[in-house]
Amino acid sequence: MADLHKFANPNRFVRIARAVLPWSNIVTALLLISGLYLALFNSPADYQHGQSVRIMYVHVPSAWMSMSIYSFLFVASLVALIWRHPLAHLAARAAAPIGAGFTLVTLVTGSLWGKPGWGTWWVWDARLTSVLVLFFLYLGHIALTHAHDNPERGAKAAAILAIVGFVNVPIIKYSVDWWNTLHQGASVIRADGPSIDGSMLTPLLLMSLAFTTYFVSVLLIRIQSEINARKIQALQLSQAAG
Amino acid sequence: MEALITYLEMDGYAVYIWPSYGIVALVLIGLAVWSVAGLRATKRQLDLLQPAVEARRRARHAASTGDGEKIAEESSQ
Amino acid sequence: MKPKRKRLYLALFGLSALAAAAFLVVTALDESLLYFYTPTQLAERGVATGVNFRLGGIVEEESVAQDGATTQFVITDRQATITVSFDGMLPDLFREGQGVIAEGTLNAQGVFAAHEVLAKHDETYMPKEVADALKEQGVWQEAAPVTQP
């Protein structure tokens, strides 16, 4: 953990964040432009879905983000509870709203894709239900970090929720294999290679990378705000004491 | 113009495709704007609070040591 | 024991207890988490007539027949088949050789009377030209059999 503690100093973290931020912003913009160009203008219609396959280029990356951000939340919460790393709680608190946003996008775009494809906006199959549970886990986490008068205890309760709720992530991933669902199986991460044509895989991966660097940018901004908020709190306390 | 309309219609899937990209734009831009605004707000508040607290600390220090020596200040943002 | 170490062991213990609990819950719920039954599962279990449930499988090739507003087709999982009748709007992706989920009841004649039909597509995405080329070369794989739990 020695390496992690190098970033324990908030001032050092802020210096690093400020150096990284312009680059992650530029990379996000470039990836988004090229990804959207391919997704909307320069990729073929699907042999089954027709043009509606274009929804996949935002739906699937959002779904991946919703799960990877939850995994980030899980790791940050473990680090916070076990090693008491000073930035871990702040990182978790900063990440949760971004994860909730991507989960909302996943649910709405999935519904908009389900109607023309399956013939229904929503069904209570194992995949759709477990993603809805993920959304509520994010909302619960956000509520807990804000509910307590004592921010330390709120952060602790939220960390425990994040760790307990992590069981849902493998359930989401494998729900389509374990149970009969309306939702189809995995297309990209599968043992026999992607079952998706290269002309469609490229925009899908570009959009995923764009969402990932977007997450890095917004996370860095939000962690800085959290650090500032802690400093304000400390200053107000010392002002009240002095 | 004709071609643009044909493109926007997306073979009849327009009502599903454009709202999908719309919600993505709404959520991603909304989160980014909200986060940047939050950072600016905390910075402003910090800039207001810090000089006040520093001044008080300096005054207290000067009173206790009897001279106005400067205190090494931690860089703070 | 250092407190840090103690917290680590506590967390590991908690996580394994949690994983065990989740495993038990998921196993217990297994049946009810099935969104649909395949014709084979149905044949094994047997369902009384008049009970509402969902049936999933592939629409058998050349089995779709239109009679006025009523559509008749056969759902297969390549092992067992069931005839379905439905009088409503079919989804865009309803096609022979493609996945489908029908909700309804078995009638006395052993026909599944559906009141809702949903298309279950597979996870293959490709442009039409590629699909046509694959079919031409004879390397086309028909819709994968519906996954067995």
Image: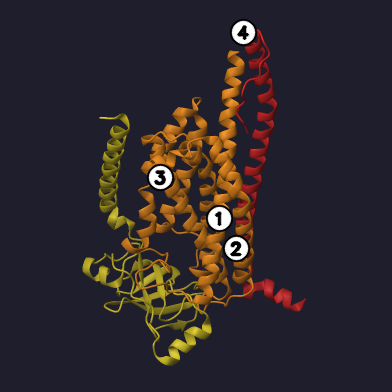
Determine the chain carrying the residue at label 3.
A
The N terminus of chain A, quarter of image: top left
Disc number for residue A213: 1
In the figure, residue C35 lies in which quadrant?
bottom left
Determine the chain carrying the residue at label 1.
A
Residue at image position (58%, 41%) is: A15
Disc with the residue nearer the chain's start (1 vs 3): 3
10 Å crowding of disc 4: few (<14), some (14-19), many (20+): few
10 Å crowding of disc 2: few (<14), some (14-19), many (20+): many
Separation (CA) of disc 4 from disc 2: 58 Å
- Hue used for the chain lettered C: yellow
Contact between labelled residues 1 and 4, with CB atoms less than 8 Å apart: no
Q: Is A215 above or below relative to A194?
A: above
Separation (CA) of disc 4 from disc 3: 47 Å
Q: Is B54 above or below relative to C89?
A: above
Instruction: Identify the residue under disc 2.
Output: A31
- Closer to the camera: disc 4 or disc 2? 4
10 Å crowding of disc 3: few (<14), some (14-19), many (20+): some
Amino acid type at circle 2 is Leu
Amino acid type at circle 1 is Thr
Disc number for residue A75: 3
Separation (CA) of disc 4 from disc 1: 51 Å
Residue A125 visible (yes or no):
no
Residue at image position (59%, 66%) is: A35
Q: Are discs 3 and 2 both within one chain?
A: yes
Disc with the residue nearer the chain's start (2 vs 1): 2
